[in-house]
Image (tube, rainbow, N blue to C red):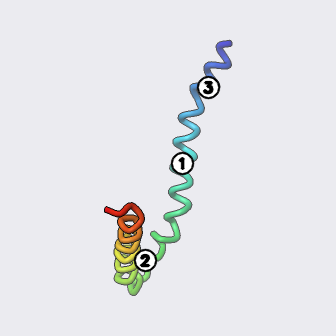
Amino acid sequence: MKDFWNNISRYPRFFVSSLIGLILVIFTPIRNLFKIKKFRFILPIILILFLGILSKILTSMTGI
């Protein structure tokens, strides 16, 4: 029974480490784009446009 609770207590740590690994894998290509000079200016503009369009869509969907 002690082994059972020991294994159960390891799951949150495994979840957090898996989530951090997933985030690192997803954002590594974006981080590599910042090494190229011309993308340093284009990428923030694309990010701002994406967030603006997303907020417009969400406000239209919710009717706020």
Seen in the image, is 12 located left or right of residue 43? Answer: right
Q: Counting other residues with Cα less than 10 Å from the Cα at mark 2, is it few (<14), some (14-19), or many (20 or more)? A: few
Q: Which mark is residue 8?
A: 3
Q: CA distance from mark 2 to mark 1?
A: 25 Å
At 35% from the left edge and 63% from the top edge, which residue is drawn? 63
Q: Say if 43 sits above or below 22 in the image.
A: below
Quadrant where the N terminus sits is top right
Q: Say which of marks 2 and 1 sits in front.
A: 1
Q: Which residue is mark 1?
A: 19
Q: Earlier in the sequence, mark 1 or mark 3?
A: 3
- The amino acid type found where label 2 is placed reads Lys
Tell me whether the residue at label 1 lies in contact with that at label 3, contact meaning CB atoms closer than 8 angstroms: no
Report the Cα–Cα distance between label 3 and label 2: 42 Å
The picture places residue 19, in percent across and down from the top left corner, at: 54, 48
Please name the residue shown 51% across and 56% down the image: 23
| First along the sequence among labels 2 and 1 | 1
Nearer to the camera, 1 or 51 = 51
- As shown in the figure, which amino acid type bears the numbered disc 1? Leu
Q: How crowded is the residue under tag 1: few (<14 C-alpha within 10 Å), some, or many (20+)?
A: few
> Rounded to the nearest whole Å, what is the CA distance between mark 1 and mark 3?
18 Å
Q: Check disc 3 and give the amino acid type.
A: Ile
Residue that label 2 marks: 35
Q: Position of residue 36 (x, y in %)?
A: 43, 82
